[in-house]
Image: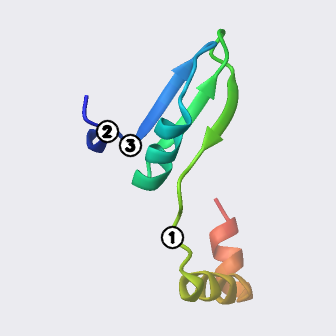
Amino acid sequence: MPLHHLGTLVCFGSIMISPALMHRCADDGIGLVLLDGNGRFKAWLDGAVSRNILLRQAQHSKAAEEPFALAIAKP
């Protein structure tokens, strides 16, 4: 299967992953999840993520507004 069709690669058990594949997944933004032989979560590797500072500043500013924070917190 071509990598560009994948969003995340999930690996079960004791497997070998080449450094080249890990780098390729990171470069292409493909997540890599490692599970043990019983399916328990071990690790999650993710490629570069967008760091939009303007968005984060707006989110923190909005969260500081008491009426907004109270409305969001209520079920």
* Nearest to viewer (mark 1 / mark 2): 2
Badge 3: residue crowd in 10 Å (few <14, some 14–19, many ≥20): few
| The image quarter in which residue 12 lies | top right
Nearer to us of marks 2 and 3 is 2
Earlier-in-chain disc, 1 versus 3: 3
Q: CA distance from mark 1 to mark 3?
A: 16 Å
Q: Position of residue 11 (x, y in %)?
A: 53, 23
Residue 43 appears in which quarter of the rendering? top right
Q: Position of residue 48 (x, y in %)?
A: 53, 61
Task: Say which quadrant the C terminus sits in.
Answer: bottom right
State the residue position of label 3: 7
Which residue is disc 2 drawn over?
3
Residue type at mark 2?
A: Leu
Q: Amino acid at mark 1?
A: Ser
State the CA–CA distance, disc 1 to disc 2.
20 Å
Q: Secondary structure at mark 2?
A: helix
Residue appearing at x 64%, y 82% in the figure: 68
Give the residue displayed 64% in from the left and 13% down from the top. 14
Residue labelled with disc 1? 50
Residue 27 relative to residue 36: left or right = left
Secondary structure at numbered mark 1: loop
Q: Quadrant of residue 27?
A: bottom left
Q: Residues within 10 Å of mark 1 (few under 14, many from 20)?
A: few
As drawn, which residue projects farthest toward the top?
38
**Residue 21 or residue 59, whichever sits in front:** 21
| 7 to the left or right of 74 | left
